[in-house]
């Protein structure tokens, strides 16, 4: 059964290629690859984020509030039919603690629910509770598909503490047009070439051995939100285009 609800802390780090290679090599003593990383390969994640017409959700998020939430539609493969499985998620962050609520749907069920408010028929209690929360969110937030964000991921679990997990995301691709998961992965790159976003996901304290490795490799925490950074770049490009138009120049 897919995980439908969990809470955790998340800490983020930006790594270059050398730091990434050295860290992954040292992790082998303490951690195992995620079951989805078959033969050491990465897996792909495709997300559609929902926001208001004036980007109120992400603007609130980057203001560092005590409480924030985002709605997204996620898939682990490019959907080819309305019967393919997707995950509708409401991600909340309360005083630094992440609570992710998700329900497993077909793509058709998700579209019917999001676009026409036709609620999927679920028999289990947790799925219905998550649908209740998402329904309440939709009642109070007029949101639409706004940003696509896809990336390649490698993940690890600690052998002695399954609640300690690391993910490395690369080739983070974003776009604000062609907002459909079925279209696949294309758009602009959010990170520099051979740069990696590492996320530490844990319920308690970070193990001392991991802290020591980070210190040895000079890897330091960073403030980085995929959607937040995409939005800031979007605003920058928008302002630059306005300046070009004000000077009477053409936008390529």
Image (cartoon, grey):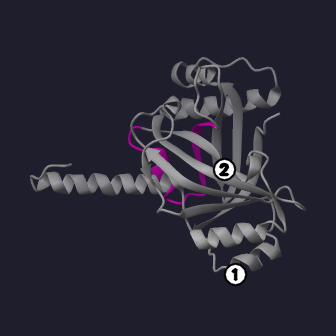
Residue at the image point whose x is 62% and y is 35% from the top: 77
Q: Among all residues in the image, which is located at the extreme bottom?
A: 216
Q: Quadrant of the N terminus?
A: top right
Q: Is residue 105 found inside the magenta-colored segment of the image? A: no
Q: Nearer the viewer, residue 205 or 77?
A: 77
Q: Is residue 57 found inside the magenta-colored segment of the image? A: yes
Which is more N-terminal, label 2 or label 1? 2
Up/down of 97 relative to 19, above or below = above
| Magenta stretch in the rendered image | 53-75
In the rendered image, residue 84, in percent from the top left (x then y), is placed at 65, 24
Q: Among all residues in the image, which is located at the extreme left?
A: 248
Name the residue beneath numbered marker 1.
215
In this rendering, the count of numbered labels is 2
In the rendered view, does 107 fall on the left or right side of 158?
A: left
In the rendered image, residue 180, in percent from the top left (x then y), is placed at 48, 31
In the rendered image, residue 41, in percent from the top left (x then y), is placed at 69, 50
Residue at the image point whose x is 70% and y is 76% from the top: 214
- Residue 30 appears in which quarter of the rendering? bottom right
Check residue 42 in the rendering and tell me which mark sits there, or answer none.
Answer: 2
Q: Nearer the viewer, residue 177 or 19?
A: 19
Q: What SS does tag 2 mark?
A: loop
Q: What SS does tag 1 mark?
A: helix
Q: Among all residues in the image, which is located at the extreme right?
A: 160
In the rendered view, does 150 fall on the left or right side of 230?
A: right
Up/down of 61 relative to 204, above or below = above
In the rendered view, does 192 fall on the left or right side of 86?
A: left
Residue at the image point whose x is 76% and y is 37% from the top: 4
In the rendered image, residue 134, in percent from the top left (x then y), is placed at 63, 32
Q: Nearer the viewer, residue 174 or 163?
A: 174
Check residue 205 in the rendering and tell me which mark sits there, or answer none.
Answer: none
Give neighbour class at mark 1: few <14, some 14-19, many 20+ (Cα, 10 Å).
few
Give neighbour class at mark 2: few <14, some 14-19, many 20+ (Cα, 10 Å).
some
């Amino acid at each position: 059964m897919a995980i439908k609800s969990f809470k955790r802390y998340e800490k983020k780090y930006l790594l270059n290629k050398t730091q990434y290679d050295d860290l992954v090599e040292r992790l082998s003593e303490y951690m195992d690859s995620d079951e989805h990383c078959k033969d050491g390969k990465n897996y792909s994640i495709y997300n559609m984020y929902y926001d208001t017409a004036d980007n109120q959700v992400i603007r609130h998020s980057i203001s560092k509030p005590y409480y924030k939430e985002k709605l997204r539609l996620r898939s682990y493969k490019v959907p080819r039919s309305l019967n393919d499985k997707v995950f509708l998620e409401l991600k909340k962050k309360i005083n630094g603690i992440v609570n992710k609520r998700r329900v497993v749907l077909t793509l058709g069920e998700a579209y019917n629910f999001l676009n026409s408010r036709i609620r999927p028929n679920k028999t289990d209690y947790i799925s219905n509770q998550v649908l209740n929360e998402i329904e309440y969110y939709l009642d109070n937030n007029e949101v639409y598909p706004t940003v696509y964000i896809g990336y390649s991921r490698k993940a690890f679990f600690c052998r002695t503490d399954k609640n300690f997990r690391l993910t490395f995301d690369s080739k983070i691709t974003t776009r604000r047009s062609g907002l459909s998961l079925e279209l696949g992965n294309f758009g602009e790159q959010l990170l520099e070439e051979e740069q990696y976003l590492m996320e530490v996901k844990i319920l308690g304290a970070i193990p001392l051995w991991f802290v020591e490795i980070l210190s040895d490799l000079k890897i330091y925490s960073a403030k980085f939100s995929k959607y937040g950074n995409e939005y800031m770049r979007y605003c920058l490009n928008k302002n630059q285009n306005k300046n070009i138009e004000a000077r009477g120049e053409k936008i390529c």
